[in-house]
Every structure is written in C-alpha cells, then in structure tokens.
Image (cartoon, rainbow, N blue to C red):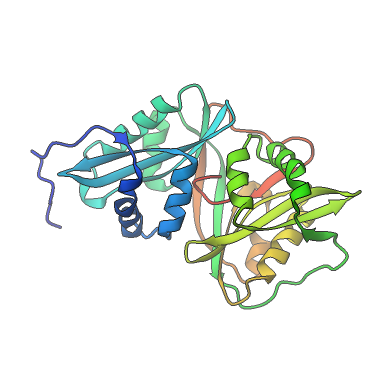
Amino acid sequence: MTDIFPETTVTSDAMPLTRDHLPQALALSRAVQWPYRAEDWAFAFDLGRGFGVEMNGRLVGTALWWPYGDDFATAGMIIVADEAQRRGIGARLMDALLADAAGRRIILNSTDEGQALYRKRGFTPFDNVIQHQAVLAETPELDPALPLRPATADDRATLMELDRAGAGMDRTNLLNALFAMADVLVIERDGAAAGYGCVRRWGRGVVIGPVIAPSDEDAKALIAALAARHVGDFVRIDVYRSGGLGPWIESLGLPQVGEVLCMALGAPPEARDGVRLYALSNQSLG
C-alpha cells in the first residue's frame, strides 16, 4: 500500500470532534467494516464527547466517551485509519479522552488490536462481550404465561432505577434517548416493571438491547419477544459472556460472529438489587 502520509507529515494533536467531522468519521468506521449508519454516529455524538486527529486536513482517528452519572463513563468508537497506523495516533486519542474523563471509572470493549494500548493506561479485563447476528429466519418460541407488555410513560422512573441497578451506573441520558426511538417491553410483576428490553434500528438492521432482567428466563423472554417483531430482518445482539445466554441465542438462529474483551480503568460497575444487564445497547455505549 502506498503511504499517503509520509513520515515528514505533521500530525495534529487530538482535538475536539465536531459535527462537521461526522461524515469523515462515518467513512473511517466503514473502512474498518463497522456497521454504523450516519444516524448511529449522530446518536452517539449527541450523547457524549469525542476527539479526532487530522493529517493533511483529513480525519484519520476518532475516540468518544459517554458520561454516566458523576462516577462512570464508557469509551468507544476508537478508530485509526489503516494508512495512519503506527504513528502514535491511538495513544494521542486515548490520552486526550482520559484527561477529559479524569476522575471517572471507565469501561470499554476492546478488539485484540487495542488491548496493548489500553493495558498500558491501566485498563484491566473483567468480562467478554459476544456479538450475535444474522437475518432472523424464524419466530422464536414465546411463553404466553410470562407477563410482558409495552412500556408506558408511567414506567419511566421504574425503568431508570432498574437500569441503574442492573448496569451499576446512572445512564439517564442514554435511556431518555433510547426510549424516544426504541420499542420497549417490560416484565410486569406485582403491578410494576421488573425488567425491560429495547429493540431499535441500528447498523445493518436492528439491535436488541439494553436488556435488564432479574433472571436468565426473564431475559430470554424479553429477547425472544423483541426478536419476534423482526423476523426477516437483520438482527444483532451483544451479550456478556458471564450472562450465559450465548448458546440459547445461537439456538434462535443468531450465531456468534465476534467477541471483544471488556476492560475497566478502576473497578467495573456492579449490578445490585437482583437484576443485571444481559444485553448492551451497543458495544460502545454499553
């Protein structure tokens, strides 16, 4: 490959990412075969903060982070163009991101290529995320006895608290944005929501998540009901390996196609109150 950025080229310092950068950011993600649409980039950008690096006036790297309450953050959409590799751009981006998010415990999901960079900055592994996806060919088996229903505006406060308990972080801004665009189902027990799941347009089709539930069976019920709405669509779901749902999700016709390492700077968030986060909204936002 011809090096279009010779060694004498001056590389910019990491600078704040702006909305004007988004078309070039989309091109970067497409070049590494990540399935983001322009709408997905805009959604993530509006919820967080980001940095970019330019060479010869062209965007060649991005890194974003999202604040969750006062104590936590997630980081993602960390991309360096192939032709700009091995120039310290990833390090510049991460150092700018960490300085901006200083004082927070940060989690991210790393490809094999990124792990050395993150380990050098103090990140340690705590789980894995498994990516399942395919065109869903058949309707999953549903249990009509399980008390599922669409979420209503009256559920919002309860769902926010369930999410704080299951994710271990205050993700109010993310949930407000998701609830405005996603189909949301809840499990109702004793007159109140006991768990919830979302499905929305994203990437090549739809993505299921987040899913917060008190048990594996409840999580399966939510996932199956959400998937049943999208037979014939391209369906993706990202789940924690520790949740143990991978083999069951494969039985729905959604094979595992990838796996990333979950890493944390500081102690990772912990679920409480008998609920947990089974499926992520996506790998960057958590």
Residue found at the very far top of the displayed protein: 103
Residue found at the very far front of the displayed protein: 153
| 204 or 275: nearer the viewer | 204
| 155 or 144: nearer the viewer | 155
Q: Residue at x 62, y 60 (%)?
A: 199
Which quarter of the figure is the C terminus placed in? top right
Residue found at the very far right of the displayed protein: 190
Figure check: 216 above or below 145: above
Q: Residue at x 47, y 31 (%)?
A: 123
How many marks overall? 0
| 194 or 135: nearer the viewer | 194
Q: Residue at x 25, y 51 (%)?
A: 82
Query: In the visual, does 246 lie left or right of 21?
Result: right
Residue 48: x and y in percent read 47, 39
Say if residue 240 shows up in the picture.
no
Residue 184: x and y in percent read 69, 57
Figure check: 255 above or below 178: below
Figure check: 219 above or below 164: below
Say if residue 266 shows up in the picture.
yes
Q: Residue at x 51, y 49 (%)?
A: 283
Query: In the visual, does 246 lie left or right of 109?
Result: right
Which quarter of the figure is the N terminus placed in? bottom left
Query: In the visual, does 120 lie left or right of 238?
Result: left
